[in-house]
């Protein structure tokens, strides 16, 4: 057995951190945001698991079981958000890399050349718009899931193992950080979306702002214990 198997900072974690710190295009900030919130959801599960089955907290048994089970679903979705963000970024990069000019113009009239280049530019613009929507949806989903996890976290103070209240606080901070960090990636893609679909861009921006406000409010509430 590899000695690293017994270490918490094992090979899998170190590989991710090395990739994050490398010059590779992915993972990046969006993946880090998703991971932060996934850690928060996992901490909620831990607190619930250390409460379930304890006679002292018997009256909160059902609540903690529900928090644990719902947090498990969110943890999985947030973990998937790490790859969703990377995939979306690569699609945007590929769209921006599409040609805008004809590489071989020999034999083409000026009119034919202009027509072909107009077609290339239109195809590139459409691809950027489509990819940008996906690139905004990925972090927006992280924001939604983070807010949902914060709603669960808000139920735990006073209703879970008091010895782990600090872990609830850490969970809230991780979730708020993930939520707020993901917002940067949503905002970064809004200009490209707005060029093609202003109404969609406005809806995304509004939801982003509302989730940020809710996340801040819930975190403040949780930290009051």
Image (cartoon, helix red, strand yellow):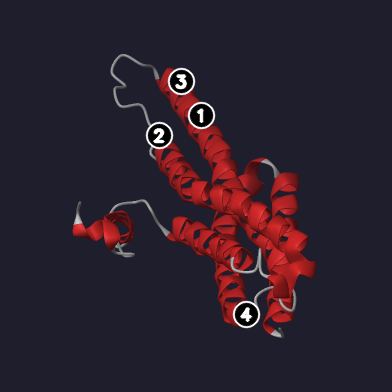
Which residue carries the number 1 mark? 123
Picture residue at 57% right of the left edge, 36% below the top:
130
Residue 66 spot, x, y in % from top left: 72, 56
Of the two numbered discs 3 and 1 on the same chain, state the one appearing first in sequence: 3
User: Please, which residue is most extreme toward the top here?
Assistant: 107
Instruction: Identify the secondary structure beneath mark 4.
Output: helix
Which residue carries the number 2 mark? 98
Instruction: Identify the secondary structure beneath mark 3.
Output: helix
Q: Do the residues labelled 2 and 3 touch (CB within 8 Å)?
A: no
Which of discs 4 and 2 lies nearer the camera? The answer is 4
Residue 49 spot, x, y in % from top left: 60, 63
Quadrant (top left, top right, bottom left, bottom right) of the C terminus: bottom right
Q: Residues within 10 Å of mark 3 (few under 14, many from 20)?
A: few
Q: In this view, does 221 lie to the left or right of 37?
A: right
Picture residue at 28% right of the left edge, 18% below the top:
106
Which of discs 1 and 4 lies nearer the camera? The answer is 4
Of the two numbered discs 1 and 4 on the same chain, state the one appearing first in sequence: 1
In front of the other: 150 or 114: 150
**Residue 197 placement: quadrant:** top right
Which residue carries the number 3 mark? 111
Label placed on residue 165: 4
In front of the other: 21 or 72: 72
Of the two numbered discs 2 and 1 on the same chain, state the one appearing first in sequence: 2
């Amino acid at each position: 057995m590899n000695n690293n198997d017994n270490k918490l900072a094992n090979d899998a974690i170190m590989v991710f951190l090395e990739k994050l710190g490398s010059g590779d295009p992915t993972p990046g900030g969006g993946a880090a945001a998703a991971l932060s919130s996934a850690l928060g959801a996992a901490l909620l599960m831990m607190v619930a698991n250390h409460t379930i089955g304890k006679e002292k907290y018997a009256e909160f048994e059902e609540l903690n079981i529900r928090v644990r089970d719902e947090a498990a679903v969110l943890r999985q979705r947030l973990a998937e958000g790490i790859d969703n963000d990377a995939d979306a970024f690569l699609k945007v990069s590929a769209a921006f890399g599409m040609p805008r000019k004809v590489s071989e113009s020999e034999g083409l009239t000026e009119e034919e050349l202009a027509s072909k280049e107009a077609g290339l530019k239109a195809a590139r613009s459409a691809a950027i718009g489509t990819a940008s929507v996906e690139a905004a949806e990925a972090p927006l989903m992280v924001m939604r899931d983070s807010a949902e996890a914060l709603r669960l976290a808000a139920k735990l103070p006073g209703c879970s193992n008091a010895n782990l209240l600090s872990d609830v606080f850490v969970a809230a901070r991780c979730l708020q950080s993930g939520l707020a960090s993901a917002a940067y990636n949503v905002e970064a893609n809004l200009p490209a979306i707005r060029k093609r679909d202003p109404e969609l861009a406005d809806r995304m921006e509004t939801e982003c702002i509302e989730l940020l406000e809710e996340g801040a409010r819930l975190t403040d509430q949780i930290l009051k214990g």
